[in-house]
Amino acid sequence: MTAVENFDLVVLGGGSGGYAAALRGAQLGLHTAMIERHKLGGTCLHNGCIPAKALLHAAEVADRTRDAQLFGVMATFESVDMPAVQRYKDATVDSLCKGLTGLVKARDITYIEGQGRLSSPTSVNVGDRRIQGRHIVLATGSVPKSLPGLEIDGRRIISSDHALFLDRVPKSAIILGGGVIGVEFASAWTSFGSDITIIEGLKHLVPAEDEDSSKLLEQAFRDRGIKFSLGTVFQKAEYTQDGVKVTLANGKEFEAEILLVAVGRGPVSQGLGYEEAGVIMERGFVQVDEYMRTSVATISAVGDLVPTLQLAHVGFAEGVLVAERLAGLKVVPINYDGVPRVTYCHPEVASVGITEAKAKEIYGTDQVVTQKYNLAGNGKSLMLKTAGEVKLIQVKDGPVVGIHMVGDRMGEQVGEAQLIFNWEALPGDVAQFIHANPSQTEALGEAHLALAGRPLHAHDQLL
């Protein structure tokens, strides 16, 4: 006989969206259970954001060591010890995982390890246990995708999951996909000494970003010796004696030691009882409204499982929104345009709001004004030896609706950019703020001064 345990809130999945819902729900007095089949923290903590950024920081240290003489420091770069890099990465992940485990315990959340399956609109089965809840939150996340006919073997043809745990630096690699995952690995591996070629079927790297940001990144990658093929789709991959050969639809061929498939992530939703419980799905994604409610009144869904931005901080926000709604608090739907986005390659690409192309589509070409500020005029960026720009997009005589930045550490500036967009600030509103000197935040200030017609260290030129 199946044992039944009763809760106010049952969360299926312990990743960013799931644990945020559980933590906030418990904080608001909901008797909460959380079920996770793998590790608490999910993709972001164990197979995504955190380990990838740890590798990227190690890559930055390698670059700084090679370039130390540019700063008057005499240092010699010897090699990259990947097992040691992995230990550094794992220590970072372990520390965060222990902290999260402590939080879950402190909030008195019942944490259940095991494979959960939705057994009704108000219950989840885990082995011989039935976890009953007044409300269920689905948060089962995502896994790396591939393309039809392209089998990931974990050796020569790998996913990002495999790439994060490589115990060696590949001599050469082809990266299929020029989005966030692809360019971040391209950046890290190049810093470690690999020969990299990126293949992207669309016409630009990081194609979801503003076209000017993509072009700046492409030039920076050319300068770093990273090769890429744009605008032609993948046709096939086959083994060679020493590695992999990739053929494109136009007949071009590329060979390397390994092929990293970085074509995005797909939802984990099959065989978990969702459709049997009446949850409407499309292409594997659970369909939700702006309050993260599914087609079943007692079920919500968050994170990579739903067709919103696949970002950990989006999962956090969605999980918190659901918990607060269920606790009876007034909630506001998420404005996904207002979510900060960062690609942590070298140089970084950061943005919030909409692209210039989207702004022209919405408001009309004659109603869109743009302003660029080159980081060559920013003292701190010169000290850091980084190039790039801040680009602002404004509705004529109205607020700033897009902020797009390229350059090292631009991800640290996106917090202010988020406030500017979400508060619908006018250029003059930001121009009056005093930014610390020398700092990279001055670049945002200078761009807004110029857009407000008050340029200080920038040319008074609106584009």
Image (cartoon, rainbow, N blue to C red):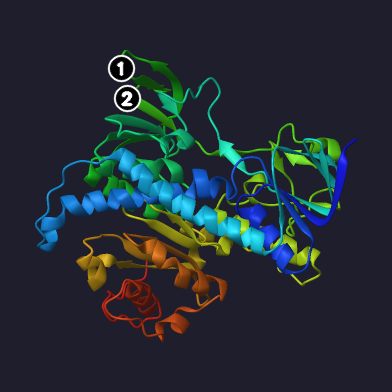
- At label 1, the amino acid type is Asp
- In the rendered image, the quadrant that contains the C terminus is bottom left
Instruction: Give left or right: position of 120 versus 85.
Output: right
What residue do we see at 77% from left, 72% from top? 330
State whether residue 27 is above or below residue 140: below
Q: Is residue 313 visible?
A: no
* Drawn side of residue 318 relative to residue 265, left or right: right
- Considering the numbered disc 1 on the image, is that residue within a helix, a strand or a loop? loop
- Dividing the image into 4 quarters, which one contains the N terminus? top right
The structure residue drawn at horizontal position 45% and vertical position 78%, both measured from the top left corner, is 427
Circles 1 and 2, Cβ within 8 Å, touching? The answer is: yes
In front of the other: 234 or 45? 45
Where residue 343 appears, as percent x and y from the top left, is: 42, 52
Estimate the spatial distance between the alpha carbons at disc 1 and disc 2, rounded to whole Å. 6 Å
Q: Residue 257's mark? A: 2
- Residues packed near mark 2 inside 10 Å, few (<14), some (14 to 19) or many (20 plus): many
Residue with the mark numbered 1: 242
Please determine whether, in this image, residue 362 is positioned above or below residue 261: below
1 or 2: tag closer to the N-terminus:
1
Could you tell me residue 86's position as x and y percent?
37, 42
User: For the point 39% across and 51% down, which residue is it?
Assistant: 54
Residue at 51%, 21% (x, y): give it. 151
Q: Nearer the viewer, residue 22 or 297?
A: 22
Q: Position of residue 267 (x, y in %)?
A: 64, 39
Residue type, numbered disc 2? Glu
Query: Callout 1: few (<14), some (14-19), or many (20+) C-alpha neighbours within 10 Å?
Result: few
Residue 143 visible to the viewer: yes
Residue 411's quadrant in the figure?
A: bottom left
The residue closer to the viewer here, 24 or 108, is 108
